[in-house]
Image (cartoon, rainbow, N blue to C red):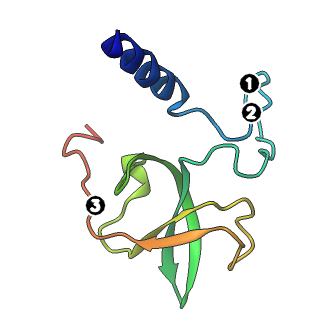
Amino acid sequence: MLGAVCLVVLLGYAYGCGQPAVPPQLGSRVVGGEDAVAHSWPWQISLQYSRSGSWHHTCGGTLIAPQWVLTAAHCISSSMTYRVVLGKQDLLTDDESGSVAVGVEKTIVHEKWNS
């Protein structure tokens, strides 16, 4: 009996994993994009590169584990310095409340991404 209760509790937690904190408003195709409700996609990151002393958004990515981000290979250049920013709503605001910037320690690009 205790095993069944534990199983139900674990399944309940698993069901909530990956669910947005704020339910998104899903629509049709993305053409030109639209603003999301703030913090409705907590695993979405902004990949930014440094140039002339400031940071610039280059691509989005997905937080797939506590210290791993998945993004498109064409977003990465070996000559750039990157950071990952979580919790951003406005890409034009540098010090946005609730956002966290973390330096990128290592990039791994699939060797056949462009073949």
Split into 4 quadrants, where in the image is the C terminus?
top left
Give the residue type that dot 2 points to.
Pro
Q: Is residue 95 above or below residue 77?
A: below
* 37 vs 33, nearest the viewer: 37
Residue 73 at x, y = what percent?
Answer: 36, 48
Q: CB atoms at circles 1 and 2 under 8 Å apart?
A: no
Q: CA distance from mark 3 to mark 2?
A: 32 Å
Image quadrant in which you'd find residue 76: bottom left
Which sits earlier in the primary sequence, circle 1 or circle 3?
A: 1
The residue sitting at 76% across, 52% down in the picture is: 38
Q: Which residue is mark 3?
A: 107
The dot on residue 23 is 2
Residue 6 at x, y = what percent?
Answer: 37, 21
The residue sitting at 68% across, 78% down in the picture is: 94
| Horizontal relation, residue 4 to residue 47: left or right | left
Mark 1 residue element: loop
Crowdedness near tag 2: few (<14), some (14–19) or many (≥20) residues, C-alpha within 10 Å: few
Q: CA distance from mark 1 to mark 3?
A: 31 Å
Which sits earlier in the primary sequence, circle 1 or circle 2?
A: 2
